[in-house]
Amino acid sequence: MKHVLVITGAAGSGKTTVSNYLSEHFQIPRVVTHTTRRPRRGEVDGRDYYFETRQSMGQLHLLERVEYDHHLYGSSYEGLQKAWQDHDMATIVLDTKGAQTYHERLGEQAVVIFLTVTKQHALVKRLAKRGDLKTAVKQRIASAEYHRDLTLPDELTATAQVITNDEWEHTQQQLDELVQTLQ
Ligand SMILES: Nc1ncnc2c1ncn2[C@@H]1O[C@H](COP(=O)(O)OP(=O)(O)OP(=O)(O)O)[C@@H](O)[C@H]1O
Ligand SMILES: Nc1nc2c(ncn2[C@@H]2O[C@H](COP(=O)(O)O)[C@@H](O)[C@H]2O)c(=O)[nH]1
């Protein structure tokens, strides 16, 4: 059975870091999603996201679409099929609303990983350390979506793999174990 590892959690919890690790160490491809937000420093169109306008976003054939911190984000079934073409596993980085949609639509094929940290203030520190502009961090942590994504939705508590990403070595160990069980 093909699987998609749906990596979710609050901003700064380490979703992209986890996806990059799985790509580098296990060659698991990431589904590139679409957004109307502007690229951050170093982000590349087609690698990190497909950067869209509201108009071009409206023309896409999407599996799900959300509004997060005043911007649109969406992922397509075609993107998932493309990642699955040569691999039995793929990753996708989503907010918790998107993670619920994948759980509902794909059932057991969607393995949800919810990332959290013990101390919430670590998230803000990590966003600043990543180089995000102060104003962008302020806006992000003031958003309703940021607060919502600090908690795993009730619908996912029975099935999601919860990883407390305080110490990277421990996170890595849990990811290695998870990948082994799915291979
Ligand atoms: N266990 C960890 N310990 C310390 N720093 C970490 C850890 N995991 C990730 N980071 C760092 O935290 C920052 C945020 O990580 P990342 O970009 O992966 O978060 P994210 O959940 O994808 O955030 P966003 O939703 O805002 O895109 C990065 O600079 C990353 O290197
Ligand atoms: N439901 C979806 N969520 C998505 C998608 N692509 C990214 N995301 C999530 O949005 C927030 C904000 O991302 P950022 O890159 O601006 O920090 C974050 O939680 C992402 O995981 C998507 O296609 N659908």
Image: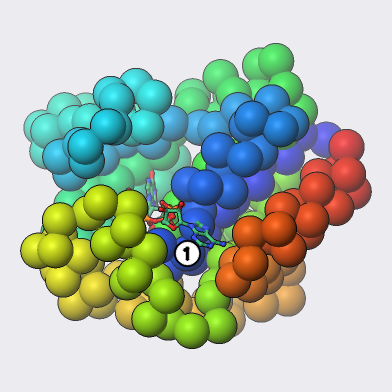
What is the residue that sits farthest to the top in this orientation?
A: 86
Q: Quadrant of ligand 1?
A: bottom left
Q: Secondary structure at mark 1?
A: loop
Asked whether residue 143 is in view, the answer is: no
Local packing at callout 1 (Cα closer than 10 Å; few below 14, some 14-19, many 20+) is many
Asked whether residue 162 is in view, the answer is: yes
Image coords of residue 60 (percent x, y): 28, 29
**131 to the left or right of 149:** left
**Residue located at (47% from left, 64% from top):** 13
Q: Is residue 29 above or below residue 183?
A: above
**Residue located at (22% from left, 30% from top):** 51
**Residue located at (32% from left, 58% from top):** 129
Q: Image quadrant of residue 109?
A: top right
Residue position marked by numbered label 1 in the rendering: 13
Image coords of residue 167 (percent x, y): 63, 67
> Which amino acid lies under the numbered mark 1 shown in the image of this protein?
Ser
Position of the C terminus by quadrant:
top right
**Residue located at (20% from left, 65% from top):** 137
Image coords of residue 46 (percent x, y): 34, 21
